[in-house]
Amino acid sequence: MTAFAPIRTAIRSPRGGVSAAVLVLVVACALFAPLVAPYAYDIQNLPGANTEPGAAHWMGTDEFGRDLMSRIIFGARTSLSVAVTAISISVAAGLTLGAMAGYFGGWFDRAVTAVVDLTWSFPEILIALILIAIIGPGLESTMVAISIAYLAQFTRLTRAQIMALKNETYVEATTNLGAGHFHIIFRHLLPNALTPVIVAGMLATGDAIILEATLGFFGLGAQPPTPSWGAMMSSGTAQIFIAPWIIIFPGLAIAITVISINLFGDALIEALDIRNRLRSV
Amino acid sequence: MDASVPRDDSLVTITDLTREFSSGDGFMKPRRTMRAVNDVSLDVPRGKVTGVVGESGCGKSTLARLVLRLLEATEGKVIFDGKDLATQSQSEMRKLRRQMQMVFQDPYSAIDPRYTIRRALLEPFKVQGEAKTAAEGKATVDELISMVGLSPRMMDSFPHQLSGGQKQRVGIARALALRPSFLVLDEPTASLDVSIQAQIIDLLESLKEELGLTYLFISHDLSLVRYFCDRVVVMYLGRVMEILPGAETQPRHHYAHALLDSNFEPDPTRRKIVTMLGGEIPSPFAKIPGCAFVARCPAASDICKRERPPLTRLGDGHMIACHNPMD
């Protein structure tokens, strides 16, 4: 049994295979954007503004005459890196907080649970907006806002896992061998609690892309000329009747990426057989 | 105090051990405390098997955990090999744990599902900070695994690939890895098939001879306790009712008598009328001023309701906590 076996199983299922292929394509676009993109993302060509999709510009040009396909390819970088970084931070912090709260209990657990339940009771977008209102717009603050917005989810999930696992006999048995808390948490509890949290993190990455796009749409995320799918859609609203492709293509990019992440996550949940463990949140 | 056994001969001495658990936060729900183990004094003699019997909820598993300091005692002392466990620092306790190990009731969850048998058997050394080279590790695991009668081929299996009996053997090997002198056996056969139970008991018996171990054997299986143990401690609601010096000694406490009498006789011609206990087990939260067994005892008198009977000697290591013992 290796860690990759469930991933292989997931890829073999129809929805897992298709979604994995799309995700590989999206990630490759983000990684190799300068090689893949036909034009630079920030070269303006005002006479060629709002060109319809055609042979020269497959997805047309925007209101400044920039190639839309190139901007979408570079935009994948922004969207994916913000979402993945934010969720990684959030998962790491959630694992630490949740493990400590679930394992040690007591006043620390009550404090963490109180704060987490408070943030849990608001939608993520509201928390992110409040945080950005405090720290100001930009790429870094978007990451911070998204990671804090999702922190409650991972903390709760980890805490629930740890609380269930810490009563297993092997924890007591290992304690009796002379093991300290550190050994118990890092060698036994976290490895056993990790799988559902990682999968939840993967699914949340899809939501985080939408959240990043939403913040970008409001102009709170990446600042021009850095392309971001959300900001591109926002600028497309003004041209929606003269150049609808400016809003359609970034929207499609978001939809396809997020649907693929969700489908693949779903296939992975199936392959790992952990649906009920994720429900414990 | 069990004066019949010289104190220097006992590996573990338990004095007035009490453990309370509480429920309710005292704010929305009234705070209630129960004494899972109530004022227990006991000696575990070296090289012998001391059995603890009682029905579920009588505090025998709590007692096992207190003896190993897996739980902290509310009151009282556990002296292990001359050392008071409660006063040991964390690192002293870690060293001491090499001497005292435990075999658990549920072999199915006693090994981390992500660990191979090899890794599980090497963990004791890792935890104790004893680095082993790959060759040393293999030799150690080989030795441990054959000591409990398993094939070294199983070394790289995961727990879910093993049967219950095999898992319990791994549990025993893990407990023996650090060469302890004292083993607490918490119902080691309770979750195994009957045919496997006998094998495990045989194994434990031969390991005891081979390694000169001292056992504290927790069980609710009376026939097993009578077969396996040199001394039998009968517990009821967290208290010691009677200590029988040998398996053949007739119990004189009414509870111990009823308990041992309830043992099912497979031969119908030899079956006798079983004394059925009336009454109800009191709630563990109830504060009982007198004898814990008073509500169900056929010989209960006034004094039993008022005064808790002390554990007194009947001679020859036989001890009883009863105002009106049987003849």
Image (spheres, coloured by chain):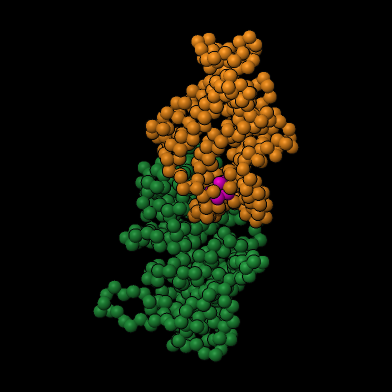
Chain colours: A orange, B green
Q: Is residue A53 left or right of residue B199?
A: right
Seen at 55% across and 20% down, the residue is A245
Please tell me which residue lies in front, B47 or A43: A43
Is B184 situated above or below B34?
above
Which image quarter: residue B304? bottom right
The C terminus of chain B - image quarter: bottom left
Magenta stretch, main secondary structure, is helix
Is A213 situated above or below B170?
above
Please tell me which residue lies in front, B227 or A118: A118
Seen at 57% across and 19% down, the residue is A243
Give percent across and percent down for residue A2: 43, 36
Seen at 48% across and 65% down, the residue is B216
Residue located farthest toward the front when viewing the structure as drawn? A241
Seen at 46% across and 61% down, the residue is B185
Magenta-highlighted residues: A157-161
The N terminus of chain B - image quarter: bottom right
Is B195 situated above or below A266?
below
Is B189 situated above or below B234?
above
Residue B18 seen in render: no
Residue B284 seen in render: yes
Which image quarter: residue A74? top right
Please tell me which residue lies in front, B1 or A25: A25
Give percent across and percent down for residue A95: 59, 43
Please tell me which residue lies in front, B302 or A78: A78
Residue located farthest toward the left when viewing the structure as drawn? B269
Give percent across and percent down for residue A221: 66, 29
